Amino acid sequence: MATITPMFVGILIAGSIEKATISQIFPVMYTAMAVFAIAFFVLLIVPIPEPNAATSTEPIGKLMSGALKFRHFILGAIAIFVYVGVEVGVPGTLNLFLTDPIEKGGAGISSTISGFVVGTYWFLMLIGRLAGASLGAKISSKAMLTFTSALGLLLVFLAIFSSTGSLVNLPVLQQSATGGLSFGFAEVPINAMYLVLVGLCTSIMWGGIFNLAVEGLGKYLAAASGLFMVLVCGGGILPVIQGLVADIAGFMPSYWVIIAALGYLLFYGLVGCKNVNKDIKVD
């Protein structure tokens, strides 16, 4: 869905966002409402068995405070917060950059093309996760997180320092002169290509961070997992910060926020993931 939705919305609007009318937006809203309604109906009628998870007699508050005694878990929780912000912030700001007019610092391309470019980011995340599932048994979580963070840093650095006037051809769905839609190659700034490739890096970070952060937690694992899920709110906070920077300094300079976030993830993969609290009892 994350891959298809930007493409689908771009097709429905099929033009400049500034010129989009309410009548063009209605199909998007109705489609979203239909998807949520179908999902709600399926969840309502399909029985989902509860897993036989191990239970603890200790109060949940005590378990949470116990998990927070582990330095590598605290740093890992921050890493999850930062990671989700990177995952959402990279394509979100990219979409704004591609569709904004050139005089406002954007690339000035249509929402249809932009939707397919951003959709490619999510598609690469899907490919990366499928590949990561097979590589996970052969490569350690530490090595995977370190490598993907470093590669992500390189790609974002290239995006920031490359000229927005340098163009590359990417395969997209575009609108022809007659109004029809067809696949072809569209010229987009090379910055967009580098940022799309970041999707391969972010695709396997979640599993690596989680595995490293909960290692050695024992009975505190369930409480730690709950805290992890709370911190996915980073996906709503970090992009806002990046957006504020973009309003002040421009789209590409706003990716310094992403650089800082990826730098932290690299630190966690190299140093922060080490369990220095092995003396704490977890039985």
Image (tube, rainbow, N blue to C red):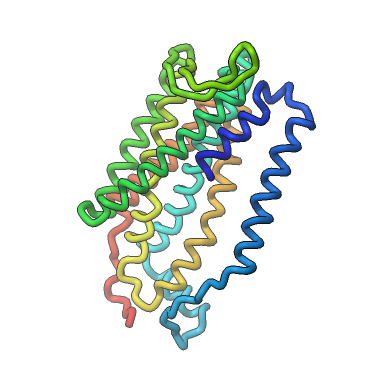
Q: Residue furthest left?
A: 138
Q: Nearer the viewer, residue 212 or 185?
A: 185
- The reply to whether residue 151 is visible in this rendering is yes
Q: Residue furthest bottom?
A: 57
Lateral position of residue 147 relative to residue 49, left or right = left
Q: Residue furthest right?
A: 22
Q: Residue at x 44, y 38 (%)?
A: 123
x and y, in percent, of residue 13 in the image? 67, 28
Q: Nearer the viewer, residue 227 or 277?
A: 227
Q: Residue at x 46, y 17 (%)?
A: 185
Which quarter of the figure is the C terminus placed in? bottom left
Q: Is residue 152 above or below residue 36?
A: above
Q: Is residue 266 above or below residue 194?
A: below
Q: Residue at x 50, y 75 (%)?
A: 49
Quarter occupied by residue 96: top right
x and y, in percent, of residue 140 in the image? 24, 54
Lateral position of residue 31 relative to residue 145, left or right = right
Q: Nearer the viewer, residue 140 or 43?
A: 43
- The reply to whether residue 250 is visible in this rendering is no
Q: Nearer the viewer, residue 40 or 167?
A: 40
Count the labels in the image.
0
x and y, in percent, of residue 79 in the image? 42, 52
Lateral position of residue 23 relative to residue 61, left or right = right
x and y, in percent, of residue 259 in the image? 42, 36
Q: Is residue 264 above or below residue 19?
A: below
Lateral position of residue 62 relative to residue 103, left or right = left
Quarter occupied by residue 151: top left
Q: Is residue 157 above or below residue 187?
A: below
